[in-house]
Image (spheres, helix red, strand yellow):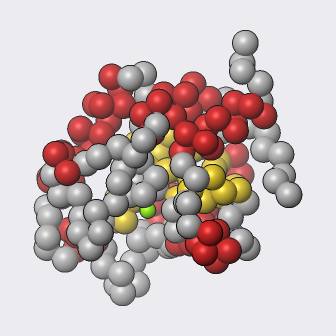
Amino acid sequence: MIRTLEIDSSWSLFLDRDGVINRRIPDDYVKNPEDFEFLPGVEEAIAFLAEKFRYIVVVTNQQGIGRGLMTTSQLEAVHRKMMDDLQEVGGRIDKVYFSPDLKNSKSFTRKPAVGMGLRARKELTGLRFRDSIMVGDTGSDMLFGKRLGMTTVLITQDIYEIRKCSELADFSFPDLISFARALFMRNGSGE
Ligand SMILES: [Mg+2]
């Protein structure tokens, strides 16, 4: 049973990037702006969500940097393109945090570790985890959100992933636009 999600304009939204905003590249990384492909409906979804949330924050693991397969400035170019494209359609991302660390590095920033969340709270005035939603496509994202006391939303079309995350995910939707629609339905159209 889905628990009702009551949010207001003081809430913040944390988004994972790969598999939520843009298409994942199997066994590779999005190294250049031209490799960045929005998933269907995402630009529209973020434009809607931008009206609803105080902050929209991207938190993304990018160990391609740690592995030497891409540079920080390449990643920044990708994020600039992502933010520019979203801005063009009325969307907004307030801040992007990334962790360049390797999977087995005992990183404090790589999800499911909470470093990127703590940094966001420090830098964004008024951001509160209990009034935040973490949206991601893996159990690691859900654990990150739960460790910080956020509401968690799993974006996947994989029934096995849903089952695997059933303890950690408060809600599940097939894609970001379905999540955005559900929020607007539950809270009225705002008119
Ligand atoms: Mg992901």
Q: How many marks?
A: 0
Quarter placement of the C terminus:
top right
185 horizontally vs 177: left or right: right
Q: Is residue 92 above or below residue 130?
A: above
Please provide percent x and percent y for residue 137: 51, 62
Quarter placement of the N terminus:
bottom right
Residue depicted at x 54% and y 49% = 175
Q: Is residue 38 above or below residue 108?
A: above
139 horizontally vs 10: left or right: left
Asked where in the image residue 108 lies, by quadrant, the reply is bottom left
Residue depicted at x 62% and y 29% = 52
30 horizontally vs 11: left or right: left
Residue depicted at x 42% and y 34% = 43
Residue depicted at x 22% and y 74% = 66
Asked where in the image residue 30 lies, by quadrant, the reply is bottom left
Residue 167 seen in render: yes
Which residue is situated farthest in the top direction here?
191
Please provide percent x and percent y for residue 101: 31, 74
178 or 32: nearer the viewer: 178
Please provide percent x and percent y for residue 167: 73, 73
Quadrant of ligand 1: it is bottom left
Please provide percent x and percent y for residue 13: 57, 44
Asked where in the image residue 168 lies, by quadrant, the reply is bottom right
